[in-house]
Each structure stands twice: as C-alpha cells, then as structure tokens.
Amino acid sequence: MLDDLKKCFENANVLCIGDVMVDRFVYGKVERISPESPIPVLQIQRNFTVLGGAGNVARNIISLGGRCHLLTVSGDDTVADELALLFTQESNLNAFVVRDLARTTTCKTRFVSNGQQMLRVDDEITTPISDRTQALLVDEFTKIVAHTKVVILSDYAKGIFNADFCQLLIKIAKSAGAMIVIDPKGKSYERYRGATLLTPNMKELAEAVPYPLVTHEDSVKAAQDICVQYDISAMLVTQGANGMTLVTESDAHHIATEAKEVFDVSGAGDTVIATLSVALSSDLSMNTAAVLANKAAGIAVGKIGTATVTLAELQAVYHPGVTFHDETKKNCTREATLDAVKMWRRQGVTVGFTNGCFDILHLGHLHILKEAAAACDRLIVGVNSDASVRRLKGDSRPVQDEETRSALLASLSFVDAVVIFDEETPLELIELFQPDVLVKGADYTRDRVVGAAAVQARGGKVILVDLVQGHSTTATIKRMA
C-alpha cells in the first residue's frame, strides 16, 4: 500500500507529444432576443483560456507532482502567442512547439450563460503536418526520450499523427526502453502496433472490432484480440459509470467506478492517461497505476470543464480518512487555489478576494469577511505569513502562528480558500487569481488598496466595508495584557 503519493511521484518524468489546443470560455448574460434574428444576445461579462487537448494531459501530469516534456505544433498566429503564455504559467513544464505558417492554432471557444453552454466555435486545421515539421518533432523527441520512462501519444485527430509517424515514434521509444501509453483514435489500431498500453473507451473499442460488444465478456475479448493482433501489452478500457477493465492477452481485472457525482466527463480521459503515466514513470505496477487512474477519473468527472486533479485530491481518495497535506481542505497552495479558480470560472461564478493578518480573529474581521462573501460567489482570503506579519507589526507579532490563523479562517463556512503569502502585500496573489471583486476595510481609500487598479482594469470592482468600531487586534491584545 502506498503511504505517500507525493514522495512516490516526485521523480515522475513524462514525455507527451500530441495535439494541443486553446480552450476559451466566454461567459455572459442573456436578457433579450436579437431584433435581427430570433437568437439570444449574449452580453459578455468575462472570459478566460486554458490549455486543452495534449495541453490538458500535461497539466494533469504537473498537478499530480510530475514533470512533463510536451512536444506539439501550432500555427504562427495570435492564438499561438496565447498558447505560449499559457505554457509559461505552468510549473514543471518544458514545452517544445513547432510554429507552422501553413497551420492555424486549434482554438475551441465556448459561449456560456447561466451555466449553460450556448455555442461552441472551433477554429482549426486538421490536415497532416508537413515533413519538415515532423522531422523537427522527431529530432526533439529522440533527444528527450532517452531520459524518460514513459511516453504519451496524445492523439486528438488534429493532424500530428499518421500511421507512419506513430510507428516511428513507438520504435524510437521502445529502443530507448520507454513505455508508450496512447489514448487511441480511429477504427484501425495498426498505427499503434507495439505500444505498451492503450486507453480506449467502450465506443472506441467497439469501432475497432468487427463484432458487436454486448456483454462485459465481449469487451474483454475485443481488447485481448487487439492486444494479440497488434502486439500491445495491455489495454485499460474505460466504461464510464461501469468503471474500468485492465486487460492483457491472458488476464482481465475489473475496477469499479469511483465517481460520487458526475458533472462533466470532458477531460476525464486526459486525467486517466496522465495518472497512468505518472504512476508507471514512478515504477508502480500496471495494476496499481490503473487503480490510481480510476480514482483520479472519479475526481475529474465531479468537476466542470477541462479540470485537473491534484496530488492532494488523489491522495485523499486513495487513503480515505487519513489527513495528508492541507491542500485537501481550504488551506491551499497557490497552485491548488488557481486550479479551483479556473474551475469556478468555468462554472460562471464570481470570485472575490480579501486579505489581512487576522492575528486574533474578532468581530471586526468577521464583519468584513461576511460582507466580502456576500459580494461574490467564492471567497479567497490571503493571510500574511508569520515573517510577513513581523515585518509589518514588529517582533511581538503575530500572537498566533500562520497555521492557526489560516485554520481558523478555513473553518468559516463562507470562506472558500485560504492562501498564506510571504510578501508584504498580496499583489502577486491578486494578479495570479484575477478576482472579480476585491474587498478591504473602509480605513483604506480605493487608491490605497493594493491590486485595485489591476482588478478595475479587468472590469472588476473594489468594495470598501465599514469597520465595526471598538474591535481591533491591537485593542484586543492591550485588553489581554
């Protein structure tokens, strides 16, 4: 039994090559029908972008504590610039991108109102990549695969992979001693001959065999037939609410579903293949890797959009009832909070932010926090670290350490995330989370509120809350003395 996934995954190093895209979400409200045509008019309120396709596979690898080398192709356009910026925002990601003048960077734009997707617009070119582009990818692939244990071919049918290219990559990886994990596309698996592990869903598996799949035994037989025919070591067949089945030429092991609630299955396949690869790269057995992937999928489908699964979330479900890193609660790292913010954005909710030392939590604090929570759907509270408080208040402060202060704030039902920061101001957090609402006490003026200009420049608002007289940490400490 694994005691600590964080320690287990700390040296995981995965090479992923495949189709990357930009997933753009545009949120707004509909209050009228167009006079030009009987269609709704969407008044845009906010939008954001996130890595999709193979990019989402990479994000899942990173969020599980691994390092990812990502090889892909883009156009030479403004969306490619956006893609490059998204890459820089991911830690432990080494991205190699071939810009091809003849291509368009794949971008999927979703228009959402009241949590309902109204329209999706795809801008893409899916013709095969050029020989020159392919050669550049092969050169980089050959350099990196010598230092990795696991390779992912992330095929979204956007033009990177054809049969010859797949076979070339598989042969290079096998000669380097790396395992090859693939989420297959199309009806013919000939292109995947020699791979280590395929992860088809039931629909994909059914398309690859000439007979109907009616029973569980039928799906096992189909997977085993494909393994034998194409020299594939194993297949993990994902079956939605029915769980997953790990199949080899001679054996089949079924794993029941872990999902408690299903909100969105998009991106769950990315989570599965990322978890498998991180586990295999950490020298875990294929059975253990499949169990972990199943648990990760159960978390992923409980989120909305192309969400990632964090190491702490996986650790929590792998060891239920055991407390590990406090990311699993409201006390979060910046990375975990940013992931939550992205999920909240996909849900179309407003995000608020306030901050302070909160040395001794009193009625004045509670008043500001409640007002802040009332002004948004999700509230993040930034808390000064012990070192930061000492720089601001002197060596006699804080009275309570940062863990105690953050735990007390996290216990409040109307607080959704608590993040400790060591800087003198929360500007870095505000620029990272980009809240829609920024809240401070009325002892500040708007021009003195840190981050106000950045929030207002994005169309957000700054709220100053009246103070409750007679309540302050300094006064409380004096009375105690």
Image (tube, grey):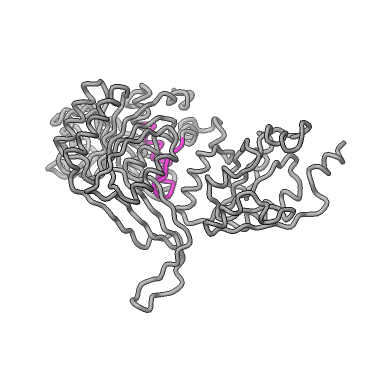
| Residue 438, above or below 156 | below
Count all numbered tags in the image, as a single digit. 0
Q: Is residue 91 magenta?
A: no
Left or right? Give the position of 263 relative to 326: left
Quarter of the image that includes the C terminus: top right
Quarter of the image that includes the N terminus: top left
> Where does residue 285 sit, x and y in percent of width and height?
34, 23
User: Residue at 38% across / 23% down in the picture?
Assistant: 282
User: Residue at 83% across / 44% down in the picture?
Assistant: 475
Query: Where is residue 387, by image quadrant?
Result: top right
Q: Which residues are magenta?
A: 291-310
User: Residue at 58% across / 52% down in the picture?
Assistant: 352
> Where does residue 11 sit, x and y in percent of width and height?
41, 23
Query: Where is residue 329, by image quadrant?
Result: top right
> Where does residue 141 sit, x and y in percent of width and height?
26, 29
Query: Where is residue 38, by image quadrant?
Result: bottom left
Foreground residue among 394 and 221: 394
> Where does residue 407 sit, x and y in percent of width and height?
65, 38
Foreground residue among 74 and 480: 74
User: Residue at 36% across / 50% down in the picture?
Assistant: 23
Q: Residue furthest bottom?
A: 35
